[in-house]
Image: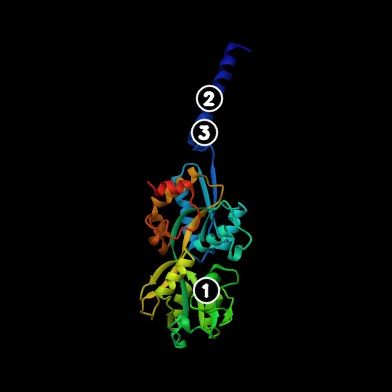
Amino acid sequence: MNISTVKKILAAGAIAALSTALLVGCGGGDSAGGEKKFLNIGTGGTAGTYYPIGGAIAEILNKEIPGMNASAQSTGASVANINMLRDKSIDLATVQNDITFYAVNGTEMFEGKKLEGLQGIASLYPETCQFVTLQSSGIKSLSELKGKRVAVGAAGSGVEANARQILAAYGITYDDIDEQFLSFAEGASALKDGNVDVAVLTAGYPTASVQDIASQNPVRLLPVDESVADGLIAKYPFYTKTVIPAGTYAGFDEAVPSVSVMAMLVAGPSVDAAMGYDITKAIFTHLDRLQGAHAVGKQITKETAKAGMSLPMNAGAEKYFGE
């Protein structure tokens, strides 16, 4: 091999090495130490509020955290998300704070199945317990429900637990009513058809299903009296007081006191303190993007991020809110 050939080989090798270096510098490798961070986010049904909020969170994390590859997926919402966090099929999820309370304490639908390793990132926005009836029913108070047909939510759901707890605060048990274990979509149809007197749901307001009923039949929301709310909160610390503004639903112009649980962001054990800090900072410094994703985004604030926190917080999230 002559000197000219050797020079050509060395030159080709140098060019190849330089090309590799340039590729790595331009995205051939990942930032943050060369490791891609994969994060699966559990939300809810595509017609609910969890799905668009979860999608917006994924977009924020992908844009603001180097090397992040976050994806939001539609799920069966709160209870399903807790089970998926336990199984480590997701890393982050939107969940009602009462459901997390049951999970970490091994009560209600998690009786005997206490979960370890769940961490709170932040409370997001209130999901209000709404007892809906038609104005034609003449029912104006929860104390009048004895002997009535009540759609209390799907069996084993968070809504059903809310309905049972609130009714118990009025001294009413399922022995006193004709309880029907219907999802709110089913309950709404039954209410419109006259097959139930009251339907219960827990959701951010205004709720599309209630708006749909109100567009065809004047509705009434039944209030949770303040003294009853105080007793509920003393017994179940995940509840907070809420007033549903007058005019929230067409044809019903009364403000209605009620109680809410909080939609919150929960992390599984795969999210360490450093990641928890990065996630929390990214979200709460770009709240405008959540506001653009859904109307409930306007209720997400740093000031209310610990409201109704029902489980130990991720150390990184705690650090961010302490700054």
Regarding residue 214, the answer to whether it shows in the image is yes
Which residue is labeled 3 in the image?
24
Closer to us: mark 1 or mark 3?
Answer: 1
Q: Which label lies toward us, 2 or 1? A: 1
Q: Which residue is pictured at 45% across the width and 60% down the height? A: 308
> Dot 2: few (<14), some (14–19), or many (≥20) neighbours within 10 Å?
few
Q: Is residue 7 above or below residue 125?
A: above
84 to 261, vertically: above or below = above
Residue 310 screen position, x and y as percent = 49, 58
The disc at residue 323 is none
User: Which tag, 3 or 2, sits closer to the chain's start?
Assistant: 2
Pick out the residue farthest to the top.
3
Amino acid marked by disc 2? Ile
SS for tag 1?
helix
Task: Return the residue at label 1.
Answer: 163
Q: Where in the figure is residue 48, as x and y percent of width and height?
A: 50, 66
Q: Is mark 3 on a helix, strand or loop?
A: helix
Task: Judge the density around disc 1: few (<14), some (14-19), many (≥20) Cα neighbours within 10 Å.
Answer: many
